[in-house]
């Protein structure tokens, strides 16, 4: 992406929303972890399944992102692909940003 397809307002809006998006996503993950721990299985099997899952999840944008303007579009695409946000969560962003992100995802 050579040209910047978002505004300063988009960047500020992203910074104001990312913490809530991540908290919501991590709440969803925590419920999934509880389900894993509640399975009818050996304690060791549940433990190692959970360890593997957390190792994978902690790399996701819904858990942590590199906060830089140059990563804004990539972060949004990752959040959408992970299910941390939906395209409707982008309604307050500029049309340019939504068009750019829309090219990379299946709405």
Image (cartoon, grey):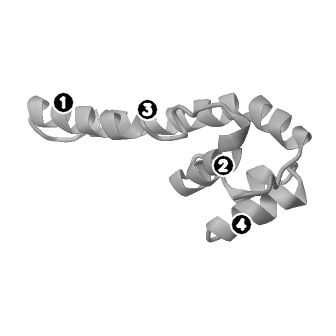
Number of the label disc, if any, that sits on residue 9: none
In primary-sequence order, the first of circles 2 and 1 is 1
In primary-sequence order, the first of circles 4 and 3 is 3
In primary-sequence order, the first of circles 3 and 2 is 3
Percent of width and height locating residue 102: 71, 66
Number of the label disc, if any, that sits on residue 102: 4
* Residue found 33% across the figure and 34% down from its top: 54
Q: Residues within 10 Å of mark 1 (few under 14, many from 20)?
A: some
Marks 3, 2: nearer the viewer: 2
Name the image quarter holding residue 36.
top left
| Cα–Cα gap, marks 4 and 2 | 10 Å
SS class, disc 3: helix
| Cα–Cα gap, marks 4 and 3 | 29 Å
Circle 1 sits on which residue?
A: 47
SS class, disc 4: helix
Q: Residues within 10 Å of mark 2 (few under 14, many from 20)?
A: many
Number of the label disc, if any, that sits on residue 76: 2
Q: Residues within 10 Å of mark 3 (few under 14, many from 20)?
A: few
Percent of width and height locating residue 80: 61, 54
* Residue found 62% across the figure and 54% down from its top: 77
Circle 3 sits on which residue?
A: 30
Dividing the image into 4 quarters, which one contains the C terminus?
bottom right
């Amino acid at each position: 992406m050579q040209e910047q397809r978002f505004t300063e307002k988009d960047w500020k809006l992203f910074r104001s929303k990312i913490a809530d998006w991540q908290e919501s996503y991590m709440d969803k993950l925590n419920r999934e972890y509880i389900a894993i721990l509640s399975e009818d299985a050996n304690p060791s099997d549940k433990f190692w399944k959970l360890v593997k899952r957390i190792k994978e999840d902690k790399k996701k944008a819904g858990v942590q992102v590199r906060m830089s303007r140059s990563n804004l579009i990539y972060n949004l695409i990752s959040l959408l692909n992970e299910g941390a946000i939906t395209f409707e969560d982008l309604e307050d962003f500029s049309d340019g940003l939504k068009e750019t992100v829309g090219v990379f995802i299946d709405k």
